Amino acid sequence: MGGEVFELISDLGGGKTAFVRGLAKGLGAQDEVSSPSFTINNTYVAPKLTLEHFDFYRLEQPGLMAGQLHEDIFRGDTVVAVEWGDVVSDVLPPARIVVVITVNDDESRNFSFTIPEQFLYLMKDIS
């Protein structure tokens, strides 16, 4: 649909980029998804939407990237995924999908989702 913002929360190596890889695949992007830890932002173009993937791990101050994030959040043809969003918490919209990934002792993952009512349509085919 577009306009969705995902805030991904987990420890280092917890699976945030793997989640974005699945999101990109679900959108139909053909690009290889990689962590934007050093570039801060990667863009993946899908047939109907663009996926903007931000990683603020290495930044204490987001600077100009906060402005870029703000612009992307309000583009209706874009889905935004943010890793380490605490650095830009003042830019993230209150209505965002929060995904918390925890790593278990056996290296499996647990996912918990906080989904605002306006984004519940994303869950309609999940049982």
Image: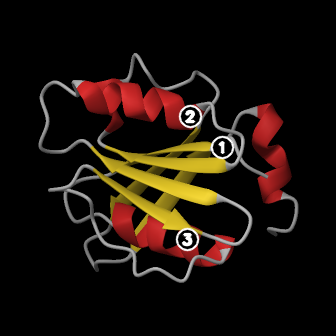
Asked if the residues shown at circle 1 and circle 2 are in contact, with their CB atoms under 8 angstroms apart, the answer is no
Q: CA distance from mark 3 to mark 1?
A: 13 Å
Residue, far top = 90
Q: Amino acid at mark 1?
A: Glu
* Distance from Cα at disc 3 to Cα at disc 2: 17 Å
Q: In which quarter of the view is residue 37 placed? A: bottom left
| Residue at numbered disc 3 | 24
The answer to whether residue 114 is above or below residue 42 is above
Amino acid type for the residue under numbered disc 3: Ala
Residue placed under numbered mark 2 in the picture: 73
Write the residue at 54% across / 58% down. Answer: 51
In the rendered image of this protein, does residue 33 appear above or below residue 90?
Answer: below
Dividing the picture into quadrants, the one containing residue 34 is bottom left
Labelled pair 3, 1 in contact (Cβ < 8 Å): no
Report helix, strand or loop for mark 3: helix
Looking at marks 3 and 1 on the same chain, the residue that comes earlier in the sequence is marked by 1
Q: Who comes first in sequence, dot 1 or dot 2?
A: 1
- Spot occupied by residue 56 in the image (x, y as percentages of width and height): 24, 41
Q: Is residue 104 above or below residue 43?
A: below
Observer-nearest of 28 and 114: 28
| CA distance separating discs 1 and 2 | 8 Å
Circle 2: residue type: Ile
Q: Secondary structure at mark 2?
A: helix
Total label count? 3
Q: Earlier in the sequence, mark 3 or mark 2?
A: 3
The 10 Å Cα crowd at callout 1, few under 14, some 14 to 19, many 20 or more, is: many
Q: Which quarter of the figure is the C terminus placed in? A: bottom right
Q: Which residue is mark 1?
A: 4
Q: Residues within 10 Å of mark 3 (few under 14, many from 20)?
A: many
